[in-house]
Image (cartoon, rainbow, N blue to C red):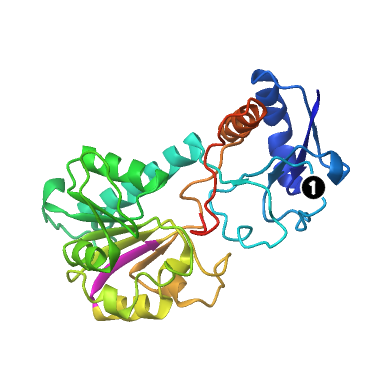
Amino acid sequence: MTLTVLFAASDANWAEYAAPLRAALDEAGLSARLTRDADPAEVDFIVYTPSSPAQDFAPFTRCKAVLSLWAGVERIVGNPTLTQPLCRMVDPGLTEGMVEWVVGHALRHHLGMDRHIVNPGRVWDPVCPPLARERPIAMLGMGELGTACARALSALNFPVTGWSRSPKTVDGIPCLHGSAGLDQALSQAQIVVTLLPKTPETENTLNVRTLALLPDGAVILNPGRGALIDDEALLAALDAGKVGHATLDVFRMEPLPQDHPFWAHPRVTVTPHIAADTRAYSASRVIAGNIRRAVAGEALLHLVDRGRGY
């Protein structure tokens, strides 16, 4: 039987994914028609991004799964018409990119690179940074991405403490959970990395109260979700010197409005949501692999828990 796979995403996504996804489906041994237009009653799988015009999933009565090209699913998980299984994207290429961004910016702040890279006054400033083992890091979020970043930083001898809302066990990384665990992790962290999903429970995880727990001059790296941080509380903490610098890749509104205070703040670095991106060649293999599993009657990978929102 030939499967019908509906590609419900933008024109730009189609131009990027059509060839590698067809190749991945062939490589997986699947007889499949990849299309952007099909009778909903004949669709077996949907490859999806929130930019798609497909927002009503009720007509897709034969669909076995909706396979997101995005790691974040907050814009679809609450759709009341979505009764099909939903799988988020866990792409090896995306994970590698996130690890590189987090490690790069952690090292930038740990080593104090800005003093020497931007030195218009030609100041001889022989300040020796501490060793990595003397620079505690809190990793907020110990999912696929947080765990990969925690392990990479730990391999460089940073003492990394993981935190998540529910208990997690990761070899070699001490993990805390719950509100008391969050307070403990933040109170000792000189660098904080936020890689939590966006849910009602995680919004404003870093706020007036929790930012006050940080050691003076702590650095925040946010490649996770803009809503994890209370913007006004962060700006106040930066102005007061409680937070030494914030490197932010994600924002509540994107692109970040030109009049937003983050652009002009001397202790803020804005990067344009580039910490990690889905790579078409590797993501296509993830999609094809999950379709093959479904056809074979195997459990889907990266299945979203609707109750938890990710």
Query: Is residue 37 among the parts visible in the rendering?
Result: no
- Give the answer, above or below, for where 287 lies relative to 141: above
* Residue 138 in which image quadrant: bottom left
Q: Which residues are magenta?
A: 241-247
- Give the answer, above or below, for where 214 lies relative to 59: below
Disc count in the image? 1
Q: In this rendering, would 160 be left or right of 7?
A: left
- Give the answer, above or below, for where 235 lies relative to 159: below
Q: Nearer the viewer, residue 100 or 265?
A: 100
Residue occupying the point 21% across, 73% down: 213
Q: In this rendering, would 76 be left or right of 192?
A: right
Residue type, label 1? Phe
- Expressed as whole percent of the image width and height from the top left, the position of residue 130 reads 11, 52
Q: Nearer the viewer, residue 127 or 41?
A: 41
Q: Nearer the viewer, residue 49 or 86?
A: 86
- Give the answer, above or below, for where 297 lies relative to 102: above
Q: Secondary structure at mark 1?
A: loop
- Expressed as whole percent of the image width and height from the top left, the position of residue 121 reads 25, 63
Residue occupying the point 37% across, 67% down: 268
In the image as oriented, which residue stretches furthest toward the front? Answer: 297
Residue 246 among those drawn in magenta: yes
- Expressed as whole percent of the image width and height from the top left, the position of residue 114 reads 28, 57
Q: In this rendering, would 277 be left or right of 133?
A: right
- Expressed as whole percent of the image width and height from the top left, the position of residue 271 reads 46, 58
Look at the magenta stretch and give its main secondary structure.
strand
Quarter of the image with the N terminus in it: top right
Residue occupying the point 52% across, 59% down: 307
Query: Is residue 1 among the parts visible in the rendering?
Result: yes
Residue 25 among those drawn in magenta: no
Q: In this rendering, would 38 be left or right of 244?
A: right
Dot 1 crowding, Cα within 10 Å, few <14, some 14–19, many 20+? many
**Which residue is denoted by mark 1 in the rendering?**
60
